[in-house]
Image (cartoon, rainbow, N blue to C red):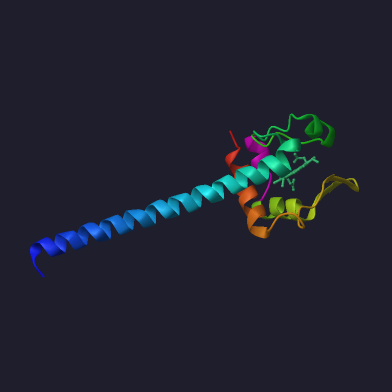
Amino acid sequence: MNLQDSSRRNAIARSLLSGVAAVSLLASSAMAADVAENWAKNCASCHGKDGRGQTKAGKMAGTKDMTDAAYQAGLKDEKMFASVKDGLKDKGKDVMKPFAAKLTDDEIKALVAHVRTLKK
Ligand code: HEC
């Protein structure tokens, strides 16, 4: 193998690698779009796009401010996950319906992670 061959081979390897990087970037942005879309479709009506819960439905349901650090500190990921999956009751009344039938566990996990990003 002469020098020219090996540098051409390196160039091919490099372009293959950058192709892989581009594909995985695309895949991760597709996942990010999914969680944003799920939040917008299923959660923002009450919690608001920004998580402050200042929507009409949110005020009626009694949503708290998710951007509040104290709110976030008071909740464990597992508890959030369970509340979204199985629903949340307050004094026997449904305040948030279960999403188990609508969202997969992975989608709910991603939404819990999304809620964490709302903290100011
Ligand atoms: C019908 C209005 C409504 C919708 C829709 C809604 N929630 Fe809630 N959610 C509430 C209320 C009310 C509470 C209790 C007060 C609070 O923590 O804001 C709550 C609480 C929570 C909590 C805290 C749970 C706990 O154990 O205290 C999380 C996390 C959460 N919601 C996430 C979501 C996600 C994710 C979605 C979308 C899949 C969603 N909510 C959709 C009304 C709603």
Q: Is residue 5 above or below residue 51?
A: below
Find out whether residue 70 is within the magenta segment.
Answer: yes
Q: Residue at x 70, y 50 (%)?
A: 80
Please tell me in which quadrant of the rendered image residue 61 appears. top right
Q: Relative to 86, is 108 on the left or the right? A: left
Q: Which residues are magenta?
A: 68-76
Q: Is residue 6 above or below residue 117?
A: below
Q: Residue at x 25, y 59 (%)?
A: 12
Rendering coords of residue 79 (x, y %):
71, 53
Rendering coords of residue 32 (x, y %):
55, 47
Rendering coords of residue 54 (x, y %):
74, 29
Q: Which residue is outermost to the bottom?
A: 1
* Quadrant placement of the C terminus: top right
Q: Residue at x 26, y 61 (%)?
A: 13
Displayed-image quarter of ligand 1: top right
Find out whether residue 57 is within the magenta segment.
Answer: no
